[in-house]
Amino acid sequence: MEFRVRKECKSSKARLGEIVTDHGEFETPVFMPVGTTGAVKGVSPDEARDAGVEIILANTYHLYLRPGHELIEKLGGLHRFINWSGPILTDSGGFQVYSLSKLRTISEEGVTFRSHVDGSSHFLSPEKVMEIQEALGADIIMTLDECAPGGADHDYVLNSVKLTEQWARRCLAKKRDNGQSLFGIVQGGTYPELREMSARGLVSMDFDGYALGGLSVGEDRTTREQVIRFTREFLPEDKPVYLMGVGTPEDILESVGIGVDMFDCVLPTRNARNGMLFTNKGKVVIKNAQYADDSSPIEEGCMCYTCSHYSRAYLRHLFLTKEILAYRLNTIHNLHYYTQLMSGIRQAIREDRLAKFSRDFYTEREEDL
Amino acid sequence: MEFRVRKECKSSKARLGEIVTDHGEFETPVFMPVGTTGAVKGVSPDEARDAGVEIILANTYHLYLRPGHELIEKLGGLHRFINWSGPILTDSGGFQVYSLSKLRTISEEGVTFRSHVDGSSHFLSPEKVMEIQEALGADIIMTLDECAPGGADHDYVLNSVKLTEQWARRCLAKKRDNGQSLFGIVQGGTYPELREMSARGLVSMDFDGYALGGLSVGEDRTTREQVIRFTREFLPEDKPVYLMGVGTPEDILESVGIGVDMFDCVLPTRNARNGMLFTNKGKVVIKNAQYADDSSPIEEGCMCYTCSHYSRAYLRHLFLTKEILAYRLNTIHNLHYYTQLMSGIRQAIREDRLAKFSRDFYTEREEDL
C-alpha cells in the first residue's frame, strides 16, 4: 500500500490523500461502508460501486464464524468469494468479540469467547487474527486490540492500552510480506495521557496506518473531538489515520478537519433499512404520511439510481409493505449520499474552500428546520 | 391488444403466438412473474428484464388496499409508479379476497370483505374492480370472478359459474375504450358440464382473452389436466388462453401442450426466497451442507447474473446469514430459469420439436435422480 498526501488544507488539519492498493486506488478522506458478513447489506457489489463506493470493510469476527476463513481462502479469497474486485479492509474482530459475543475472557494470550450464533467456544489471539486476515486476503488489515468499555476507569484503560500494544507487536511479528498493509489501533479511552502512551508505542513500531479505536462508546461528541484532536498530534503525517465506527455526516466533516483520512460506519446502510434517508437538507423518514403522494425523488438533483427512477411515494409504499426492494433502494441512496459527501469534502480541500463547504453544509440543514 | 398465432405444433395443441400491447410485445407461451404490491419480490424492474421477463402481473387486491388505486392514478399510473415500462396484467382481486381476506360475504351485487392488513371493511363489485383496474392502467385486466373452493359441490359451483358470468357481463358493460384488454375467467371447478357452460357463456360475450380460474385449489394433477384439456375445446383459437396461478416447470410444459398461452405463479420468486433453486437437472436446496465449499454456480452454463458472478458456496453463506442479497440473487436465477424454459418451449414449437424438448426435459431430471 502506498499513501501520498496530495494537498493540505490551509484552515484546518484536513488533507487530501491517495491510497494505492493491489486492488485499486482511491482518494482520502474516504468512507468505507460495512460489508459485515461479506455483503454490504442491501446492495450488490455493482450497486455499491455505482453509488460511488471505492473500498468496503468486512468483519473478521463474522467471517471467521461463518463461513470460516479457511473456506474463503480455499475458494480464492474474500475478493473473489464476494465478487468485489476493489480494495477491502478487514477489522481484527476485537470489537465484535466485545460487543456481540458472550462470556468473553481476556488474558495476555488472547480472548476466549462464545459465538453469538451458536454458543460455540473460540479463542482469538493476535497470531490467530493475523492468520485469519491473511486467509481472507483484504488489502488493509488491523491488529487485535482490547477495546475498553465506555466509562472504564483509569486502571482498566491503562491495562487495555498495554495489552493492545503487546498484541500489536505480536501482530507485526506475525505479519508476512504479502502485500497486505497492517494498521495499529490506538486505545486509551478519554484519558489524554493514555491516548498519548498508546499512540507513541504504536508509532515506534511503524505501522502502515493508524486507527483510532474505542470511540463512539458512549462519550459525548465534544469529548470525542478533543480525544481525536489530541491523539492526532502524536500520529505521523505520512500515514493514513482511520477513525473506526464513525459516524454521522456531521461527525465525519468535523473529523476530517482534525486530520482523519478514513471512516467506516453502519449508519448509511442500517438507517436505510429503517427507512431513514440522508439528504443535504436533513433526514427524510420515508414512512411519514407527508410522502404518501409525493412524486418527487428523495432528494431533488440527486443522481443516484434510486432518485433517478423512484418517487418518495413509491419508496414509502415499498417500505410500508416491507418489500425487499425498499431496503435496497434506500441503501443505494444513503451510500450515494455518503460517497458524494466525501467527494464534496475532497473537492473542497483540493480547491482550498473546506471552511465554506462546512458552512454551506450546516446552512442548508438550518434552512430546512 | 393484438394476438396472432404464428405457428401451431403438429403433435400437440401447443402454439407459438405474439401479443402486442401499448407497452410492447411479447411471444407466447409466456410466464408472468408476480409483482404482488407493485414489485416483483426480491428484484428491481431492471433485473427482472435482464432475467428475460417481458410481462409482469400485479395484484389488484393488494394495490387497492395499499397504496390505493387513486394514488397510483394520480402519480401517473402503475407503469410509472413502479418503474416498469413493459406490459402489465392485473388480476381482478377476486382470488385474494377469497384466499387472504376475512369475513367475506358474497352477494349478487359483489363481495364485502375485511382487509387482511388492518381489518377495514371493503366492497368490490364488477364495476368497482373495473374502475380500480382502469386507474392502475395495466395492459391486460381481468373480470371479477367467484372462485369456488376446492372440493365445492355441484350446486355451489353452478351458482359460482352463474355469478361469474353475470359479473363478467357487468365488467364488459363497464369497459371503456382505453386500450386495455379484458379477459374473462372460466370457472366450473372439476365439473366438465359446468366448465363448458362457463366457457360458452363467456365466449359468447367475446372477450380479448380467456383465463382458466379455480384450478390449483387442491385437485390432483391429472384432474387439472383433464379440466384444462376439456375446457380448452370451448375456447376460440384466435384468443390467448391464460392458466391462472400455475405452476411448476412440469405443469407449464404439460399445459402448453394442451393449448395454454399464458401463465403466472409465485413459485420462482417465493421458492427463491426459501432457498430453493430451479435447474435443468432438478432442484437445488442451497442451504444443504454439500454446497458449503462448492465453487460452481447454481447451474453450469446458466447465463444469469447470479450464475455469472457467484458460487453456490457464497449463495449458501448469504442464505444462512439471512443477507438480503441472498433473496435477490436466488430470485434472479429462478426468474431466468423460468424465462429460459419458456423461450426453449417457444423455440421448440417454432422448430416442430416440442415432443423431443419435452422428452429431454424429463430425461435430464431423471439422470440426476
Image (cartoon, coloured by chain):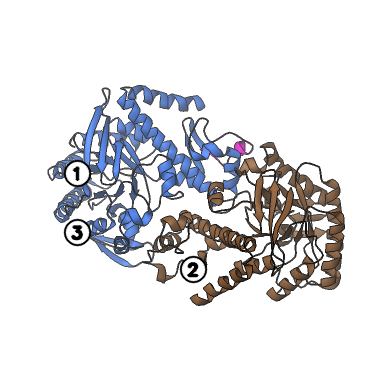
Chain colours: A blue, B brown
Query: Label 2 to label 1, Cα distance in Å?
Result: 45 Å
Q: Where is residue A45 in the image (x, y as percent from the top left)?
A: 41, 48
Identify the residue under disc 1.
A208
User: Quadrant of the rendered structure where residue A288 is?
Assistant: top right
Query: For mark 1, does the 10 Å Cα neighbourhood hold few (<14), some (14 to 19), or many (20 or more) residues?
Result: many
Q: Which chain carries label 3?
A: A
The lab-note entry on whether marks 3 and 2 share a chain reads no
Q: In this view, does B239 lie above or below B188?
A: above
Task: Report the residue marked by disc 3.
Answer: A127
Binning the other alpha carbons within 10 Å of mark 2 as few (below 14), some (14 to 19) or many (20 upward) gives: some
Along the viewing direction, whichever of A112 and A316 lies nearer the viewer: A316
At x 79% / y 64%, what residue is drawn? Answer: B187
Q: Is residue A168 left or right of residue A60?
A: left
Q: Residue A60: where, in percent of width, then height?
A: 31, 55
Camera-side mark, 3 or 2: 2
Residue B160 visible: yes
Q: Are marks 3 and 2 in contact (CB under 8 Å)?
A: no
**Which contiguous range is marked in magenta?**
A285-297
Q: Mark 3 or 1 closer to N-term?
A: 3
Q: Looking at the picture, which amino acid does disc 1 mark?
A: Asp
Q: Are marks 3 and 1 in contact (CB under 8 Å)?
A: no
For label 3, the SS is helix
Q: Distance between the residues labelled 3 and 1?
A: 18 Å
* Image coords of residue A4 (percent x, y): 22, 35
Task: For mark 2, name the chain.
Answer: B
Q: Height in image: A236 above or below A92?
A: above
Say which of marks 3 and 1 sits in front. Answer: 1
Q: For mark 2, what is the residue? A: B284
Q: In this view, does A271 lie above or below B102?
A: above
